[in-house]
Image (cartoon, rainbow, N blue to C red):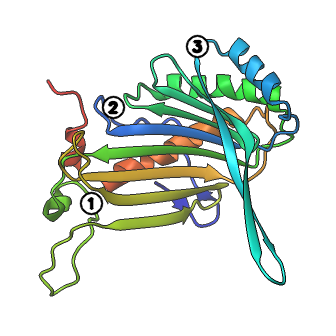
Amino acid sequence: MHVNSHQGMNIDLSERFPHLARAPIVEAVIHWRARSESMQNQEQIKTALQSKLSDYPELLTLRTLMLTTEVGPECASQAQSAKWHGFRLTSRDGRNIAQFTRDGFVFSRISPYENWERFSSEAQRLWRVYVELAEPSEVERLGVRFINRITPVALDRLDDILINPPRSPEPLPLLIEEFLYRSLYNVPGQPYRVSVTQTTQPPNPPESDSIGLIVDIDVFADATMEPNSDSMERRLQEMRWLKNKVFFSLFIDRALEQFKERK
């Protein structure tokens, strides 16, 4: 990852990364934060979504809970109300999830993740539906997030997986039971930031009785852009490149081998 102190980081979209047929991706997300200018009529939006996205038959209403408090000279009272916020749609196979809200659009792919081309193409198809219905004036934030889970892991053998694993304070012979490590990076010369979270996941019977390792990589840009900007595709490609660059910098080569196709 080349960084020039005068020009910033060079993002090379021609670079090819190793193919991981068994990549540990449990969820991939593209998030547009773009406030709606026209999502007012709940039933009208619902009808339009059902008409345009018949391949997403499961529809769930999303609401935000509002809590108000009134304080008087003798007592205080609280009241809560739920306000319609948008809709959550799920594809027939349950793997694709789309959230159309007043604040933006979120597209998620649940494991098994197929490939970037299919994932980003479907996300942008549904984004165009959001733009048509919500009519946002601008995109305030664009993000690409990949959540990985590796299981099982032995916490005393994390150096068999991570290049920079957490360590107990020397010279104390302490055993790690759990850890949470988050870093936020600014990409020099680019409009992007990268958040990397590494943490343990406790056993979750009956699905899993072993400890897992979560590696969460979120690449995002807060710079505003037009909803139908021609540069959006390139930004997504650059975010994907950054995500890949970070991912392959975290794991030792021997650990990466387990994510490749077994012969």
Q: In this view, does 252 lie above or below 206?
A: below
Seen as rendered, the residue at the extreme front is 74
**Do tag 1 and tag 2 residues touch (Cβ < 8 Å)?**
no
Residue 249 appears in the figure: yes
Residue type pointed to by label 1: Ile
- Quarter of the image where one finds residue 186: bottom right
Work out which residue is located at the far bottom of the displayed protein and give it. Answer: 171
Within the image, what quadrant is residue 166 found in? bottom left
Q: Nearer the viewer, residue 37 or 242?
A: 37
User: CA gap, disc 3 to disc 1?
Assistant: 42 Å
Number of residue marks: 3
What's the residue type where badge 3 is placed? Asp
Mark 3 vs mark 1: give the one in front: 3
What residue appears at the point 80 percent right and 44 percent down from the top-left corner?
A: 35
Q: Name the residue under label 3.
A: 55
Distance (Cα) linking label 1 and label 2: 20 Å
What SS does tag 1 mark? loop
Q: In this view, does 73 lie above or below 59?
A: below
Instruction: Where is residue 130? Give x, y as percent.
Output: 74, 29
Q: Is residue 14 above or below residue 80?
A: above
- Marking on residue 19: 2
Specify the quadrant that holds the C terminus: top left
Around disc 3, counting alpha carbons within 10 Å, would you say few (fewer than 14), some (14 to 19), or many (20 or more)?
Answer: few
